[in-house]
Amino acid sequence: MTTENNNNTQKPLVAIVGRPNVGKSTLFNHIIEQNKSIVEDVPGVTRDRVYGEAIWKNKVFAIVDTGGLVINPNDNTEEMIKEQVEIALAEADLIIFLMDGKQGVMPGDEDIIKYLRSSGKKVLYIINKIDHKKHELNSYEFHKLGIDTFLNISALHNRNTYELIDLIRDNLPESEYSQEYDEDNIIRISVIGKPNVGKSTLVNAILGEDRFITSPVPGTTRDAIDTHYEIDGKEYLIIDTAGIRRKSKISELLERYSVLRAIRAMTRSDLVLFMIDASEGPTHHDARLGDLVKSRGKASIVLLNKWDLAPKEAKEVDNIDELTIENLKSLNYSPVLTTSALTGKKVNKIFSLVNNVFENYSRKIKTKELNQFLDEIKKKNPPGMHKGKELKFYYITQPYTKPPTFVLFSNAKNKIPDNYKKYIENQLREYFDFSGTPINLIFRTRADDKD
């Protein structure tokens, strides 16, 4: 089940709605005190529901940022946004209807007010972009919409926003919500890949609901969206990221920001589900993304998605996982799973694989076992000589996990051949299960240990 939805039925939920570009995301970010939604002066930037949590004067509530609402959609994207807003409204206990004080009353405002009133939900009417007291006269015209009470704010300049949060708190229903997530026990998973590879479709398949907009138009999901998920007593945080485009395709500031957001989402995750389009196979761009995953020390699972659309000759290959990894050289430790997010093929196998890989990522080997291992591999394949000097390894320790990091003490840390370093890594993977996780090897001398 998704604990996100369970949370929102326990914690009061506030939904921010309004026409495109009235400042919803700026207000959302201020309330949750972190930049979780993209804020850019381009209408229609926020397309999906984005959830956050706020605590104000000992009261906890969830808040959701929605896409720009158009009551009579003109295209498929506006229709999908409206559907997402409708879902948010159905879940919400309190609605903030945000209007633009600089533009004044717009035709769409009256339509939205009628729409919100029909929902039967409590609505707070908020006029944004009233940056100074002298601008408050601009807001009086909103009374003609039949609004008796509204609050003037400036989300951008932090004007009256604390008064708004007080107003939110005072209008929330009573809640006995007290559960807090044990962050130490949550496995954080980011879902990455090129645009239109099926990331949001996969997350929807896992959650069992159309939580994210899915569309054949590349780049529909522009933000990183967090969802708590629980299955078999284990908790996960799933981060659905924006598709990472090649630099040559990033022409707008917004797209550059989406790439940075995806990288940041990856950085704060433990494990990456790296999705590749099986209908075209791993590309050079995928290989570069693989380099990015490894460089950040993340555990990873490669999902060959859209397997139902893969060429017939690819489906007949017995070692498709090996061939895939050959094209993703930096992720040669990652398991490969053929999936179809659209049909649900092998989606149910993902979390058992996630649990196994995360266990490997977190594995700590006792020093005694490590040194027994070192003795054995030295006997099997001695380190040899360098310029007439015998290379010696004295002992090995593991100071860190996530990823597993090993320090090997030798008599010549800078003289160890790369092929012997690779030999040590391969042997570690053979002796101890480190499938799915990178391994860091640090070579030191005894003199370093004394520093």
Image (cartoon, grey):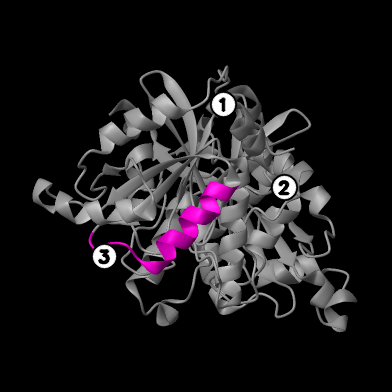
**First in sequence: mark 3 or mark 1?**
3
Residue under the point 60% across and 69% down: 79
Task: Give how far apart the Cα atoms at labels 1 and 2 are.
Answer: 18 Å
In front: mark 2 or mark 3?
3
Q: Amino acid at mark 2?
A: Leu
| Callout 2 touching callout 3 (CB < 8 Å) | no
| Residue type pointed to by label 3 | Gln
Q: Main SS of the magenta segment? A: helix
Identify the residue under disc 2: 207
**Would you name the residue on which mark 1 appears?**
181
Whole-Å distance between the Cαs marked 2 and 3?
Answer: 39 Å
Name which residue type carries label 1: Tyr
Residue 178 on image: x %, y %: 55, 18
Query: Where does the image place residue 212, in percent across and percent down from the top left?
Result: 62, 57
Q: Can residue 286 be seen? A: no
Residue 352 falls in which quadrant of the image? top right
Crowd tier of the residue under label 1, counting other residues whose Cα lies within 10 Å: few below 14, some 14–19, many 20 or above: few
Q: Badge 3 is on which residue?
A: 103
Q: Is 430 situated above or below 112? A: above
Q: Which residues are magenta?
A: 102-118
Q: Quadrant of the N terminus?
A: top right
Q: Nearer the viewer, residue 8 or 442?
A: 8
One can see residue 164 in this view: yes
